[in-house]
């Protein structure tokens, strides 16, 4: 499991997150939701080991952590398959075996053999994000970190890739921490939702969802989101009552 | 198949260059009709003067000596400059500290290096090679620093997540990015290398193209001087388009793809 204990973080003098604690157990899909500036990405960067907290402790008990970023972060000078194989190469796996693993993953992600030979610039946004997801899955992680990986995609593509990732998560029995500012997305995919408020980022509400994923139809999702948005604490976190329309 | 096609394409793209060069020759010929052969010999006269020089026992050896000096100075410069530049670029402090020094060195005129080289090494081959090295070094060094400093930190964050080892970080992350900064600097340095070698030879050597030009000046042979200029330019073009440019195309094929497909 991963355990975040009283973590705070400052960039220069600005406190971005303040005294955050939560645990994620094996097999859980936890969503962090909140408006921009609530420190979601900072928190996830800490889980990924990119950033060290200024205060508090973070214990990552998982063996292998992978991350899909908001932008694809593919190396433009490497072909799609080489990008997928990046983590494998870092592990010291030979090229022949890399290719084998990449081929299997590409099939699941519906990437064609021609696509694999292309450079990222020659691929569409959706294809590039598939390659990025492939790169994250190739190393067989047990913890998957997702930082708004679908936010740049259109609605249809977004749903397709969501389903694809969810399929992989349940198939491989992965643990996942998922950042989004979209409550609909969070309700569709998570077993637990943590709502953060901004300036500084703090957890203000924890929501458990026990409904199995196959039963989460659109009407269920809309209903749930509607109910959450009625809660004053959630409204405050998203600053719904301070907008121009209220 | 695609290789053959791209080579043919590359050669075919040379027609445009050839036609504008022929236009230049026409202007040159026109200049000759205005000022006469002593001031501006015709292209044909210049070429035949060069041919006469090459027929001499020293001719080809002069070309070969100059080539060796320019290429040796250039290779030393890109090896030392690029390595030191990457090392300096990896740390913010050294990158900052190097900047004023580079600016200072770029400000020193090549001719004053030749004077120093003459005093230090005397007449002969060392002076041109040294001068090429010191004048092009700031250029290759600065571009390597620049390239290393500008790699997107988001790629480096990503490399941390996947626990990319240092050797792979250099090979897969830094090098391809840095090369796109290095190549223009290398081509620049190569051009400078020829010019500076010849300048140094003219003042500090008894052999090489520069020495040939010094002799032409003494004998007031304008056509021979023009012939040597032609030889230099041809050498420069040959190295740039037969060595560096194909290498660049190969290493930066990921960028070429966009041009071919017309994206961006």
Image: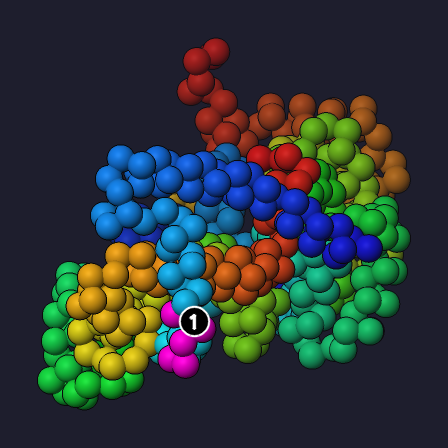
Reply yes or no: does residue B41 show up in magenta.
Answer: no
Spot occupied by residue A37 in the image (x, y as percentages of width and height): 44, 39
* Quadrant position of the N terminus of chain A in the picture: bottom right
B205 on left or right of A87: left
Reply yes or no: does residue B57 show up in magenta.
Answer: yes
Q: Nearer the viewer, residue A158 or B197?
A: B197
Name the residue: 47% across, 12% down.
A246
Q: Quadrant of residue B189?
A: bottom left
Q: Quadrant of residue A205?
A: top right
Name the residue: 42% across, 42% down.
B25
B176 on left or right of A184: left
**Residue farthest top in this picture:** A245
Question: Would residue B7 be seen by someone viewing this image from the given angle?
Answer: yes
The chain holding disc 1 is B
Spot occupied by residue B46 in the image (x, y as percentages of width and height): 37, 55
Question: In this picture, is B113 found above or below A8?
Answer: below
Question: Would residue A33 be seen by someone viewing this image from the given angle?
Answer: no
Q: Nearer the viewer, residue B90 or B57?
A: B57
Which colour assignment does the render follow?
rainbow
Spot occupied by residue A72 in the image (x, y as percentages of width and height): 62, 48
Question: In this picture, is A14 found above or below B251?
Answer: above
Mark 1 closeness class: few <14, some 14–19, many ≥20 residues within 10 Å: some
The residue beneath circle 1 is B54
Name the residue: 18% across, 74% down.
B203
Name the residue: 86% across, 56% down.
A171
A142 on left or right of A6: right
Q: Nearer the viewer, residue B93 or B209?
A: B209
A116 on left or right of B156: right
Task: Say which element carries label 1.
Answer: helix
Q: Which residues are magenta?
A: B53-58
Q: Nearer the viewer, residue B260 or B69?
A: B69
**Residue farthest bottom in this picture:** B121
């Amino acid at each position: 499991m991963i355990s975040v204990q009283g973590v705070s973080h400052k960039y220069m003098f600005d406190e971005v997150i303040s005294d955050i604690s939560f645990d994620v157990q094996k097999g859980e899909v936890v969503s962090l939701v909140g408006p921009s500036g609530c420190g979601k990405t900072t928190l996830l960067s800490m889980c990924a080991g990119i950033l060290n907290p200024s205060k508090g402790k973070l214990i990552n008990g998982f063996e292998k952590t992978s991350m899909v970023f908001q932008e694809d972060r593919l190396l433009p000078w490497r072909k799609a398959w080489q990008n997928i194989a990046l983590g494998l190469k870092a592990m010291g796996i030979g090229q022949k075996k890399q290719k084998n693993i990449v081929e299997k993953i590409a099939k699941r992600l519906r990437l064609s053999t021609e696509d694999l030979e292309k450079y990222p610039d020659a691929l569409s946004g959706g294809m590039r994000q598939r390659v990025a997801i492939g790169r994250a899955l190739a190393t067989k992680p047990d913890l998957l970190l997702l930082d708004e990986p679908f936010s740049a995609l259109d609605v249809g593509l977004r749903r397709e890739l969501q389903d694809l990732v969810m399929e992989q998560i349940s198939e491989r029995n992965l643990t996942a921490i998922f950042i989004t500012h979209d409550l609909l997305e969070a309700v569709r995919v998570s077993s637990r939702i943590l709502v953060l408020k901004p300036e500084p980022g703090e957890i203000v509400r924890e929501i458990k969802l026990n409904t199995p994923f196959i039963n989460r139809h659109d009407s269920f999702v809309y209903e749930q989101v509607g109910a959450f948005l009625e809660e004053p604490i959630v409204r405050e976190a998203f600053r719904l009552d301070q907008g121009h329309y209220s | 198949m695609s290789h053959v096609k791209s080579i043919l394409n590359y050669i075919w793209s040379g027609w445009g260059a050839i036609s504008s060069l022929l236009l230049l020759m026409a202007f040159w010929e026109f200049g000759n009709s205005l000022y006469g052969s002593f001031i501006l010999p015709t292209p044909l006269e210049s070429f035949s003067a060069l041919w006469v020089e090459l027929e001499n026992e020293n001719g080809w050896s002069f070309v070969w000596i100059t080539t060796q000096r320019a290429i040796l100075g250039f290779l030393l410069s890109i090896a030392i400059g690029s390595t030191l530049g990457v090392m300096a670029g990896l740390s913010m402090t050294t990158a900052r500290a190097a900047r004023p020094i580079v600016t200072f060195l770029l400000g020193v005129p090549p001719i004053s290096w030749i004077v120093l080289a003459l005093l230090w090494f005397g007449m002969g081959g060392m002076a041109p090679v040294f001068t090429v090295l010191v004048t092009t070094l700031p250029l290759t060094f600065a571009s390597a620093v620049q390239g290393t400093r500008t790699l997107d930190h988001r790629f480096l964050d990503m490399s941390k997540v996947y626990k990319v080892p240092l050797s792979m970080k250099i090979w897969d992350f830094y090098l391809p990015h840095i090369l796109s900064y290095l190549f223009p600097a290398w081509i620049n340095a190569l051009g400078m290398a020829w010019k500076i070698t010849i300048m140094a030879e003219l003042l500090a050597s008894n052999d090489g193209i520069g020495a040939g030009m010094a002799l032409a000046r003494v004998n007031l042979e304008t056509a021979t001087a023009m012939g040597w200029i032609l030889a230099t330019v041809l050498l420069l073009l040959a190295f740039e388009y037969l060595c560096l440019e194909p290498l660049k195309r190969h290493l930066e094929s990921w960028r070429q793809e966009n041009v071919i497909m017309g994206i961006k």
